[in-house]
Image (cartoon, grey):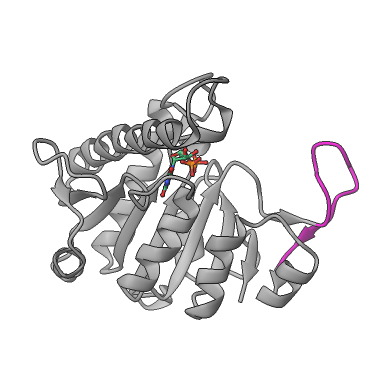
Amino acid sequence: PQSSLQYKRVMLKISGEALQGGMGFGIDPKVLHSVAREVAAASLHGVQIAIVVGGGNYFRGVNAWDGLERATADYVGMLATCMNAICLQSALEQVGVPTRVQTAIEMREIAEPYIRRRAIRHLERGRVVIFGGGTGNPFFTTDTAAALRAAEIDAEAFFKATKVDGVYDCDPVTNPDAKLHRRLSFREVMVQNLKVMDETAITLCKENNIPVVVFNLSTPGNIIRALTGDPDIGTTVD
Ligand code: UDP
C-alpha cells in the first residue's frame, strides 16, 4: 500500500480520552497497542509521524477544584500528557518502532527537551517523535500544541484522532438526527462556530495551510485510512 499513502510527514494528535478507551481513567492497554500497531505499519511504509498526546484521561486544567489556580492546574495537565507520552513510546518500541519523546517542559531523565531541528532529524531518520507537555504554557490545549508543532515541523496534515467519528452539525449525543460533515472549509468551521478544536488550534492550522482530518481512533485501521487520504473517513477541514 506504500504508493497509496498520500503523506510523507504528518502530525497525529491523540486525545487522552481516546487513549482511555473503555477504562474510566488512565490508559486502556488495548487502545495503546492498537495505536502502536497502526503507527508502526505507517512508519514502516516510510511515513514520518509526529505525535502529540493529550492528558485529559488523567487531568484537565479547566476541571480542577476551586482554589487550585488555573495556571497550576494547567501545569498538572501538561505533566499528565508526559505520562501518556512515555507509555506510548514504550508501546511503539515493543512493536519495533524507534521512538523519541521530546517534552516542552524539561525532564531530562525521561525524555529529550523539545528541540525543533532535532525533532526533524529524528523524523528524517524514521523515528516516531512524541511531543509531551503540550506547548509548555498554561492556558493552551494539546490541540494547539499539535497545531504549533505541525507548523514547526512542516507537517502536511493534522490528524485529530478522537473518540467521535468526526464533526457533526449538532451534538450527536443529544440529537439522534445529527449529520456528520465529510468536508468543511476553515471558513465554515469558523463562521458556523463548529467544534473541531479550540479556536487557537484551528487558526494555526488555517494560517499555515495544514488540513485537519478528524476521525475515530477506536475504529481499527483508521490511522492508515487517513494516511491514504480516504475521503470517507471522518471529517476533513481544508
Ligand atoms: N495543557 C496546557 N498547555 C498546553 C497543553 C495542555 O496547560 O499547551 C494542560 C491543560 O490543563 C489541559 C491538559 O494539559 O487541560 C491536558 O491537555 P488536553 O486537555 O488538551 O488533553 P486532551 O483533551 O487531548 O486529552
Residue 218 visible? The answer is yes
Q: Mainly helix, strand or loop, the magenta region? A: loop
The one nearer the camera, 161 or 148, is 148
Residue 50 versus residue 107 in the image, above or below: below
Q: Relative to residue 8, is residue 225 drawn left or right? A: right
The one nearer the camera, 136 or 220, is 136
Q: Residue at horizontal 20%, vertical 69%?
A: 120
Q: Position of residue 95 (x, y in %)?
A: 22, 42
Pick the quarter of the image with the N terminus: bottom left
Furthest toward the left, the residue is: 109
Residue 227 belongs to the span the image colors magenta = no
Q: Position of residue 59 (x, y in %)?
A: 46, 28
Q: Position of residue 156 (x, y in %)?
A: 41, 76
Q: Relative to residue 194, is residue 213 drawn left or right? A: left
Q: Residue at horizontal 72%, vertical 67%?
A: 189
Q: Residue at horizontal 18%, vertical 59%?
A: 127
Q: Residue at horizontal 51%, vertical 30%?
A: 21
Pick the quarter of the image with the C terminus: bottom right
The one nearer the camera, 124 or 75, is 75
Q: Position of residue 54 (x, y in %)?
A: 43, 42
- Residue stretch rendered in magenta on the structure: 169-182
Q: Relative to residue 179, is residue 187 drawn left or right? A: left
Residue 229 visible? The answer is no
